[in-house]
Amino acid sequence: MNTKNSSKLLILLMVLTSIGCGSKKQQESLKIKGSDTCLPLTQKAAENYMKKNKEASIMVTGGGSGVGLAALLDGTTDVAMASRKMKMDEILQLKKTGNSEYKEITIANDAIAVIVNPSNKISKLTREQIEDIYTGKIDNWKDLGGDDIKIIAYSRESSSGTYEFFKEHVLNKKNFGPSMLLMPATGAIVQSVSQTEGAIGYVGVAYIENSIKALLISYDNGQSYIEPTIENAKSKLYPISRPLYYYYLTKSESLVKPFVDYLLSEEGQKIVVSEGYVPVK
């Protein structure tokens, strides 16, 4: 190969190397994982953020609060989405890794709706009736004034923060009944309830759609029933409400904070509202 050709080859290699390095930098992603409740909001916010910041790359996946926090502990995600607070054993595990410094950010608030198939004539339940359904004491809608149809109760898996919140605040910490059908994702509950005549489930209000019916809920033994709406959750009138969190290690703040700041900004909180959640500001 002559000198002229060698020079051209060297320049070409330098250009390709430069392009490769540039691409690698652009492809460096912020990884966010966890709560299915937080998933639609985070996906939409990430999409908008990347439109405004062309070099940004954000990967968002669900799986449940426990899955997200486990990923934070083993270093496979930068942010854990959670619909519950971090547990003491998770904090202790974090300390064992040498990463005891972390941030807890409330990104939005949420309400949990109890849903049934639209064909169900039942439109309201008391907390006690929901408890009886999910602990297995009541297994037919006729016992609640409905048709003679077997109740098919759907729940999230135990790794879900919504599962834990529902058990603590709706079932009064009682165990779920043995006939419970555990679903891997909130979307799967919506689909199952929409397709099953006697079904009941629970989801974040952001998941309410025309294929399911959200019930009015009473926490005062049937004296008053409250609809699961954003307005009622914001005013704290609706009783099954909770905050939603991001958790991340302090050492990752330079990577994480720009997106978190965007989500907490006026523009970001408008996304919170438009996606069916309650803003924190």
Image: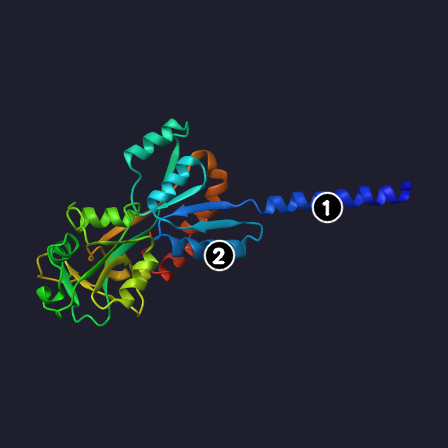
The image quarter containing residue 183 is bottom left
Where 156 falls versus 67 (above or below)? below
What residue type is disc 2 on?
Answer: Glu
For numbered disc 1, what is the local secondary structure?
Answer: helix
Instruction: Give the quadrant of the N terminus.
Output: top right
Q: Nearer the viewer, mark 2 or mark 1?
A: 1
Q: Which mark is residue 208?
A: none
Q: Residue 8's spot in the image, x, y percent?
A: 84, 45
The local crowd at label 2, few if under 14, some if 14 to 19, many if 20 or more residues have their Cα within 10 Å, is some
For numbered disc 2, what is the local secondary structure? helix
Between 179 and 62, the one nearer to me in the picture:
179
In which image quadrant can residue 20 be found?
A: top right
The answer to whether residue 229 is left or right of residue 18 is: left
Report the front residue among 126 and 134: 134
Q: Are marks 2 and 1 in contact (CB under 8 Å)?
A: no
Q: Gap between marks 2 and 1, in whole Å?
A: 29 Å
- The foreground one among 24 and 245 is 24
Q: Is residue 156 left or right of residue 170?
A: right
Horizontally, residue 12 falls left or right of residue 68, namely right
In percent of width and height, residue 193 lies at 27, 64
- Residue 281 rendering spot, x and y as whole percentages: 34, 52
In the drawing, does residue 144 fall left or right of residue 11?
left
From the image, tell me which residue sits under label 1. 16
Amino acid of disc 1: Leu
Q: Position of residue 97 (x, y in %)?
A: 41, 28
Whether residue 234 is visible, yes or no, is no
The residue to which callout 2 is attached is 47
Please report the residue visible at 15 percent of the width from the left and 52 percent of the height from the top: 135
Tell me which label, 2 or 1, sits earlier in the chain: 1
